[in-house]
Amino acid sequence: MTLAAIKEEIRRKIKRPVLPEGPENAKMVFVGEAGGAEEEKTGRPFVGRSGKFLNKELEKFGINRAEVYITNIVKYRCIGVPEEKDVKKCEKWLRNELEIIRPKMVVLLGKTAENNTPRLNGITYFPLPHPSAAMRFTKMREKFERGMKELKADL
């Protein structure tokens, strides 16, 4: 299976998908929970307010968004935290994405990603607060920025 085949399958099975994006040879994968309103409109991950924050942080720490792979646990918009049925519906796609890319590191953005991302041998998993939490809460922002510094050092 290829990343293109995964995206095509998602398109066939999900009415308004939020498709993953990034290079197949990415050393780093960012996993969020699900798309929001802007992501649903565009079909792209992390393009709304949280995405703008993430882009700013990536740039601040010298990480090029075009060189990382960005995906979500759930490949469509959920109102609130995704339910178990949403996670189960999409889990095979995320596992397949990680098996194909085999990144050095998977950055887990928020608890949903931390608790539901499949673990593969040989990959480091690095939890960070979700960008939406980092935008709203000072302690979460500080934790997010400390984590980004660590990520940059590990690259």
Image: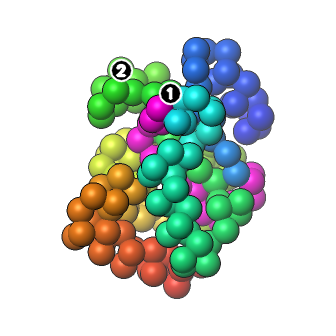
Task: Check disc 2 and report the residue beneath it.
Answer: 85
Q: Earlier in the sequence, mark 1 or mark 2?
A: 1
Please say if 85 is above or below 1: above
| Nearest to viewer (mark 1 / mark 2) | 1
Nearer to us in this view, 149 or 95: 149
Q: Quadrant of the C terminus?
A: bottom right
**100 relative position to 35: left or right:** right
Please tell me whether mark 1 sits on a helix, a strand or a loop.
loop
Q: Residue at 22% across / 70% down in the picture?
A: 139
Q: Nearer the viewer, residue 3 or 76?
A: 76
> Left or right of 77: which side holds 13?
right
Q: Position of residue 95 (x, y in %)?
A: 55, 40
Q: Is residue 62 magenta?
A: no
Question: What span is in magenta?
Answer: 23-37
Per the rendering, the mark at residue 28 is none
Dot 1 amino acid type = Tyr
Question: Where is residue 67, by image quadrant?
Answer: bottom right
